[in-house]
Image (cartoon, rainbow, N blue to C red):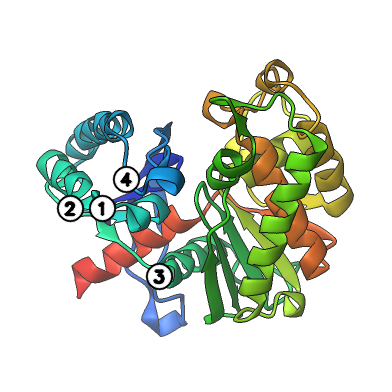
Amino acid sequence: MTRVAAVDCGTNSIRLLVADVTRPDRMSGAARTGDLKELDRRMTIVRLGQGVDRTGRLAPEALERTFAACREYAEVIRELGARTVRFVATSATRDAENREEFVRGVVDILGVEPEVISGDQEAEFSFVGATRSLAGRDDIDRPCLVVDIGGGSTEFVLGDEHVRAARSVDVGCVRLTERHLIRDGHVSDPPTPEQVTAMKADISAALDLAEETVPLAEARTLVGLAGSVTTVAGVALGLSAYDSSAIHHARISLDQVREITGSLLTSTHAERAAIPVMHPGRVDVIGAGALVLLSIMERAGARDVVVSEHDILDGIAYRAAEDTRA
């Protein structure tokens, strides 16, 4: 058994998972990654990608929010005694001119250099994390299409036991919100029909790009990851508070996603903030995130989406354990 810490630093949030990963049983044919026992999982909204689409740089205040979260995570990692730490940084830092400032800060706090991974690597980690816990289930038809809707980008991965095709495209809940929903420095409340139409056009173009590599319509099961998807699921389930165990592996229908997306895109900030499962950091970007999910389901012909709380973070932890044993 190996105790690892995995950090996923995205455009909107930074997350930590500390887990024990057991050595796989090769004689029984178990998955190469073994089993994962979660010790601590947490998320902080830091908006690292604030303004990156417009300026090409990480804002000083965004960096400080991220470093503050890293200091909190460093203390957790020390207390739990993780043997290996792997820090993966995704969309926002790929786009930023001053990413070296970010790298230096993370090294100073956590003692490891963040890996600014490619979209294809991000997709692989997401697939491993999402599908490992679905292995052997009779109600999951293959191939699976895993979609990870982030703040700055969305990853598409199609695979059976292994990845067959993957593509990352630059549409995410934060990027779309900043590009289309901000007027005079404030998020439209609610968005205008013209703004929603503009977002739909961006998403459609991104799906065209994704389909150049990933045959979306070949998927037999759609698996949705990340905060936009889990929040929509929590609304669909009518939860009075966010409940990870209820959301994990829930099936949400296309009709439910369509109804919730329409509601989110016509509601005010106050109405969205009053939703019991809504994280404060997602209030302004959830409409765009839900629209991405709906557009993917319609394009792929998916009748429902299987929601997973296991995602890129779990994939990073599995890979960190493998690297430790190598």
The numbered mark, 3 or 2, whose residue comes first in the sequence reads 2
Q: On screen, 140 above or below 285? A: below
Q: Looking at the image, is mark 4 or mark 1 nearer the viewer?
A: 4
Q: Which residue is mark 1?
A: 3
| Amino acid type, residue under disc 4 in the picture | Arg
Numbered label attached to residue 83: 2
| Amino acid type, residue under disc 3 in the picture | Gln
The picture quadrant where one finds residue 280 is top right
Residues at marks 2 and 1, CA–CA distance in whole angstroms: 6 Å
Residues at marks 3 and 1, CA–CA distance in whole angstroms: 23 Å
Q: On screen, 63 above or below 161? A: above
Q: Which residue is mark 3?
A: 121
Q: Is residue 1 visible?
A: no
Instruction: Please report the residue visible at 27 percent of the width from the left and 32 percent of the height from the top.
Output: 60
Quadrant containing the N terminus in the rendered view: bottom left
| Amino acid type, residue under disc 2 in the picture | Arg
Instruction: Please report the residue visible at 63 percent of the width from the left and 41 percent of the height from the top.
Output: 180
Q: Which residue is mark 4?
A: 57
Instruction: Please report the residue visible at 24 percent of the width from the left and 51 percent of the height from the top.
Output: 99
Q: Looking at the image, is mark 3 or mark 1 nearer the viewer?
A: 3
Q: Residues within 10 Å of mark 2 (few under 14, many from 20)?
A: some
Q: Position of residue 261 (x, y in %)?
A: 79, 41
Asked whether the residues under the numbered discs 3 and 1 touch, taking CB atoms below 8 Å apart as contact, a structural biologist would say no
Q: Looking at the image, is mark 4 or mark 2 nearer the viewer?
A: 4
Asked whether the residues under the numbered discs 2 and 1 touch, taking CB atoms below 8 Å apart as contact, a structural biologist would say yes
